[in-house]
Image (tube, grey):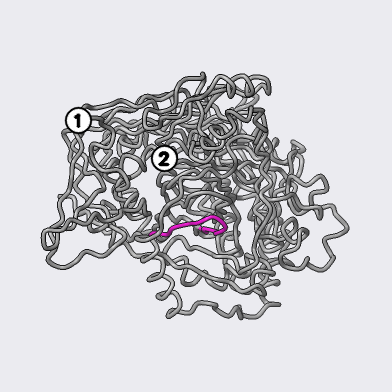
């Protein structure tokens, strides 16, 4: 039985409001001070202080198109892969996303009563607007039952009623009689009548996050509509640019002088200045390279890891349940547009295993064929289902100008409430080490290549032992180094005893570079992937005379080929002495340091107050359908005085969405596009189009 009230009872995750002073420092230090509480939820929200207003640096007029994913929202529980959606320019996507949000708002808004699309009792079809040009959004035909297009589409299902009443903007009067009106598709129109003493008063229903959340999960769980949307995810920032400006101090992988600038010793810029937004580590181009981030040792750009990805969302576009590569932290900034609804699960083994258990219970047959389905990021189950399975879930609403941080191994997912643009990147604090071990083992189980060598990164951290800040960090790192050494030496001894030849003294191998992970090192690592588990053989590898390219890790040499054991030999890059020296170096650093003295910034009373505020906001906020940018450049209209009044009237009422050819305006308006307007527009080389008055 579907308990729809569970959605409204999901607790809100923690929201933090750093001061200007706190925000002027290293964000990773700030995160360490709130981590003890925030990681219990898996995700948290950070609201920058007053005065935060970074420039939006995306090239809105970039002619390049980006590929989208075609998401069938009503099939998100099936674990199916996403197909390719339409290709868009930035402005083209905004046209599509805005038209789609307006379409949904018209269908479910109380501003239109049932039957508003009829004249004299007869049903009327209207032609909906779409974006023009380059396939940005082909024309869409809307009836009371069905919408079809190559962009977002919706089809109502008469067999499944819409069971969740939306929340109205005014409170329900006790004893009043509320009646719901269903459209012909069996869907409840968001239209309520309050009858008191024979008088009828129509309540206003807003497109609030809570109402959209109910609509969304109703589609996902009951397939009350067939909804397909195009989601612009994982967009390369080198194509359209990052939303943040690029550092001139070499703090970004995309900086021409990456980590080579002689200006990095200068004082930090003042909060709110132009230079501040370029150089602050709250800039997502810079945060992976903070001096307190483990990823600063990566000198090669990896999209989505230390180079941000850009995301263009529309209403109901979904980022499905997943945790980050190598169980890293992630930080997501919302640049512009409608909010995003987030859900988070703590990164504990119990909760993470609970999410996987739900997937296995509901998609057992699918996961037999695709055991690493969770890594495909194509499946969403309602928080209601996770909650019923004992998995703790929280939610957050992210507005423009706010950050969401996810913690190691924490599953998270959500969806957009309208047109928006966000950006995300990974980072790693030193406390991430134990989670990295778990991720590495999981990848080997599924033969999934890691984005970088875990063993190499751990040894690089040890190489820079002087940067380790606390005794706890040194202890965790030394423990992992000992684990790696013990397994390595044990397996070497077993293989040599079994007959594998050790040729390390006869073959000169290039030493592992430990000061950084650069392009050359990454290329070399790609050549020593284990044939079986895809693990990067950093310390040693088993080879066979039958192949000049195939290698195996020490765990899986028996899977490599069927050759006799005496044809196999062992290559060693890291000797036992080097391992022991590395461990000793980290332990000495730990002895030099005292215990951590970080002061927690968490105030439980304030967190509860903010959660209550967020919950109320979730019910009352009216979600915008506006695009993140102007849909077209303003071009002066050359019209005669006889037609200027008509043009003026149309400009004040018309929607900015456009179609391909000049026709009469929507039948809801008596205005028409005049010949003078058509001629003037054509003289300017502008597309002349139909304007949908209903938008």
Q: Residue at x 72, y 58 (%)?
A: 277
Percent position of residue 195, x then y: 14, 58
**Tag 1 near tag 2, CB within 8 Å:** no
Percent position of residue 390, x then y: 26, 59
Residue 400: in magenta span: yes
Q: Residue at x 31, y 60 (%)?
A: 169
* Left or right of 103, for residue 248: right
Magenta region? 394-405
Specify the label residue 102 is tagged with. 2
Percent position of residue 607, x then y: 44, 74
Label 1 to label 2: alpha-carbon separation: 24 Å
Q: Who comes first in sequence, dot 1 or dot 2? A: 2
| Disc 2 packing (10 Å; few <14; some 14–19; many ≥20) | many
Magenta stretch prevailing secondary structure: strand
Quadrant in the picture for the C terminus = top left
Q: Residue at x 84, y 52 (%)?
A: 260
Badge count = 2
Residue 430: in magenta span: no
Taking depth in this image into account, of 429 and 283 the one nearest to the observer is: 283
Specify the label residue 491 is tagged with. none
Q: Secondary structure at mark 1?
A: loop
Q: Residue at x 40, y 75 (%)?
A: 608
Frontmost of labels 1 and 2 is 1
Residue 3, can we see it?
A: yes
Specify the label residue 121 is tagged with. 1
């Amino acid at each position: 039985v579907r308990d729809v009230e569970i959605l409204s009872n999901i607790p809100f995750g923690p929201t933090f409001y750093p001061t200007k002073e706190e925000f002027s420092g290293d964000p990773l230090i700030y995160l360490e001070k709130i981590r003890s509480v925030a990681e219990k939820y898996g995700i948290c929200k950070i609201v920058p202080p007053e005065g935060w207003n970074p420039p939006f640096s995306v090239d809105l007029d970039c002619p390049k198109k980006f590929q989208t994913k075609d998401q069938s929202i009503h099939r998100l529980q099936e674990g199916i892969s996403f197909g390719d959606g339409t290709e868009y320019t930035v402005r083209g996507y905004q046209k599509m996303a805005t038209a789609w949000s307006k379409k949904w708002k018209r269908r479910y808004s109380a501003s239109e009563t049932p039957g508003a699309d009829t004249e004299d009792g007869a049903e009327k079809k209207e032609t909906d607007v779409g974006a023009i040009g380059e396939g940005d959004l082909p024309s869409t035909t809307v009836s009371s039952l069905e919408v079809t297009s190559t962009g977002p589409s919706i089809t109502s299902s008469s067999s499944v009623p819409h069971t969740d009443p939306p929340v109205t903007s005014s409170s329900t009067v006790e004893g009043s009689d509320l009646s719901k009106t269903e459209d012909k598709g069996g869907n409840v129109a968001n239209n309520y009548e309050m009858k008191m003493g024979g008088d009828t008063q129509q309540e206003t229903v807003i497109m609030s996050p809570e109402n959209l959340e109910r609509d969304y999960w109703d589609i996902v769980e009951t397939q009350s509509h067939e909804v397909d949307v195009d989601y612009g995810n994982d967009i390369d920032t080198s194509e359209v640019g990052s939303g943040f400006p690029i550092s001139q101090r070499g703090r970004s992988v995309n900086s021409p002088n990456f980590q080579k600038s002689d200006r990095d010793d200068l004082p930090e810029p003042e909060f709110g200045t132009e230079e501040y937004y370029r150089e602050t580590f709250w800039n997502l181009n810079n945060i992976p390279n903070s001096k307190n981030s483990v990823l600063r040792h990566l000198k090669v750009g990896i999209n989505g890891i230390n180079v941000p990805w850009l995301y263009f969302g529309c209403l109901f576009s979904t980022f499905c349940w997943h945790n980050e590569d190598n169980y890293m932290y992630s930080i997501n900034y919302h640049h512009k547009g409608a909010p995003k609804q987030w859900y988070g699960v703590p990164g504990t083994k119990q909760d993470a295993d609970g999410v996987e258990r739900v997937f296995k219970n509901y998609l057992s047959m699918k996961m037999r064929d695709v055991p690493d389905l969770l890594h495909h990021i194509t499946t969403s189950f309602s928080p209601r289902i996770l909650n019923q399975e004992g998995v703790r879930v929280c939610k957050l609403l992210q507005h423009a100008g706010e950050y969401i941080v996810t913690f190691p191994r924490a599953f998270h997912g959500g969806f957009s409430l309208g047109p928006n643009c966000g950006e995300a990147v990974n980072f790693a604090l030193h406390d991430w080490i134990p989670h990295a071990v778990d991720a590495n083992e999981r990848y080997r189980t599924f033969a999934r290549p890691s984005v970088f060598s875990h063993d190499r990164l751990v040894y690089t951290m040890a190489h820079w032992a002087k940067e380790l800040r606390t005794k706890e960090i040194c202890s965790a790192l030394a423990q992992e180094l000992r684990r790696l050494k013990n397994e390595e030496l044990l397996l070497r001894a077993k293989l040599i005893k079994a007959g594998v030849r050790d040729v390390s003294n006869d073959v000169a191998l290039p030493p592992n570079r430990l000061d950084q992970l650069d392009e050359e090192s990454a290329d070399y690592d790609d050549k020593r992937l284990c044939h079986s588990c895809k693990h990067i053989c950093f310390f040693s590898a088993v080879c066979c005379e039958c192949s000049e390219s195939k290698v195996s890790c020490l765990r899986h040499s028996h899977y490599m080929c069927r050759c006799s054991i005496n044809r196999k030999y062992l290559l060693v890059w890291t000797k036992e002495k080097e391992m022991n020296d590395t461990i000793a170096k980290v332990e000495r650093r730990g002895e030099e340091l005292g215990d951590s003295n970080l002061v927690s910034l968490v105030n439980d009373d304030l967190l509860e107050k903010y959660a209550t505020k967020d919950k109320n906001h979730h019910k009352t906020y009216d979600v915008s359908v506006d695009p993140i940018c102007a849909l077209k450049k303003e071009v002066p209209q050359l019209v005669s005085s006889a037609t200027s009044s008509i043009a003026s009237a149309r400009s004040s009422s018309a929607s900015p969405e456009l179609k391909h050819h000049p026709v009469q305006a929507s039948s809801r308006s008596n205005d028409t596009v005049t010949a003078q307007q058509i001629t003037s527009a054509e003289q300017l080389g502008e597309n002349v189009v139909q304007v949908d008055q209903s938008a």
